[in-house]
Structures are given as structure tokens and as C-alpha cells.
Image (cartoon, rainbow, N blue to C red):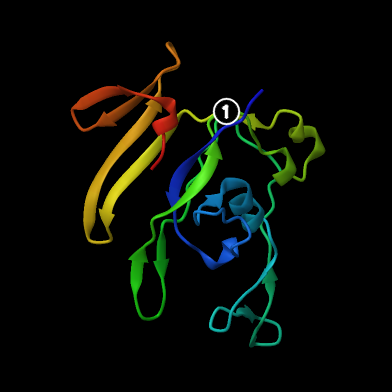
Amino acid sequence: METSYQPLRVVDDDSVGGGGRGRSGDINLEECLRAFTKEEKLKKGNEFYCRVCKEHITVTKKMDLWKLPKLMVVQLKRFQYTSHWRDKIDSFVDFPLEGLDMGPHCLNEDVKKDALYDLYAVSCHGGGLGGGHYWAYVKNRLDGNWYNMNDSSTSAMEKGSVKA
């Protein structure tokens, strides 16, 4: 089976670490998933408060996946906040339309064998922090074609155009 990747916009977050960037500055979804499950040290100002020693201490945190749902929704952070400004970042993420394998990101060996997902929809946003417009690209489960759903209009689209 041939796998093709299409772009999806996401925030240019420090957790991605630049390791998944392609030649055009795009980010790969696999790299985003690895970054999500990577151990990270909490930064100054975000220390853990220990009730035993009554002090804020620097700790690490780690997210792991143990169980996967039948239908999975992936929401990628699209906004960057710093102490001085906020911004929507329009980087793209390459992702497969079919056959996303979540097995490598799950700790439970029993779940890994049924960890393939196909994309059925993408929610898109145009605009900035102060406002904008939403639309969606949706795959029809009956005819297998992709459609652009925009307010009161729906139009057929090529699957190669599925991006946000």
C-alpha cells in the first residue's frame, strides 16, 4: 500500500524540536506524536509544588498512550503564547490520509495490532486570534470522495487538496 502525506496547519511548538521539519519547513505528524510522548522537564515558573517538603521543585513529565479508541480525534495546538505575545502559526503537518499507525506510540502490546487509522475529516480555520472562519474537509463514507463543507455550501474536491 502506498502512503501519501498531505499538509495540515499546526503551531510551531518547541516540543516538536525541529527534528520533523522537511525541506519546506513542514512538520511530520509522526514527529508530533513522538514529541507528545517524550519526557520533558518542566520549565521555571511551572514547577511542581511538593506538599511534603512545601517547596516548588523541578520535575519531569511524560505522556504515554495505553489504550486507543475506535475513532480517534487528533487536535494539534495551533497557537503559540509567550509572556510577551500570542500568535497563530501557520506551519503545515504532513499526515497520511490512510493507514496512520499508532502502534509505535502505544505501550500496550495487545493494542498495537489494531492501531491503524484512516482520516475522515479535517477542521480548518482561516484568520487569526481575534476571529476568523471555520470550514471542513470531509470524506463521504458511502462514495469514498472528499468534500469541502463551507457554511451552506458543499463541493467535491480532490483528495490531494485535503489540507488545512
SS for dot 1: loop
Q: Nearer the viewer, residue 9 or 46?
A: 9
Question: Which residue is situated farthest in the top direction here?
Answer: 142
Image location (x, y in percent) of residue 102: 67, 39
Q: Residue at x 68, y 60 (%)?
A: 38
Q: Residue at x 80, y 33 (%)?
A: 110
Image location (x, y in percent) of residue 104: 74, 43
Image location (x, y in percent) of residue 95: 54, 40
Q: Residue at x 27, y 58 (%)?
A: 128
- Determine crowd level at label 1: few under 14, some 14-19, many 20+ residues with C-alpha closer than 10 A: some
Question: Which residue is situated farthest in the right direction here?
Answer: 109
Amino acid type assigned to the residue bearing label 1 in the image:
Glu
Which residue is denoted by mark 1 in the rendering? 98
Which part of the image, by quadrant, shows the C terminus? Answer: top left
Question: Which residue is situated farthest in the front direction here?
Answer: 23
Task: Name the side, left or right, on which 69 lies relative to 78.
Answer: right
Q: Please tell me whether residue 151 is drawn above or below residue 146 in the rendered image.
A: below
Task: Name the side, left or right, on which 68 lies relative to 124.
Answer: right
Tell me where residue 15 sits by quadrant: bottom right
Q: Please tell me whether residue 38 is drawn above or below residue 104 in the rendered image.
A: below
Q: Please tell me whether residue 86 is drawn above or below residue 30 in the rendered image.
A: below
Task: Name the side, left or right, on which 126 lies relative to 55.
Answer: left
Which part of the image, by quadrant, shows the N terminus? Answer: top right
Q: Residue at x 70, y 46 (%)?
A: 105
Image location (x, y in percent) of residue 48: 62, 77
Counting labels gives 1
Q: Please tell me whether residue 76 is drawn above or below residue 39 in the rendered image.
A: above
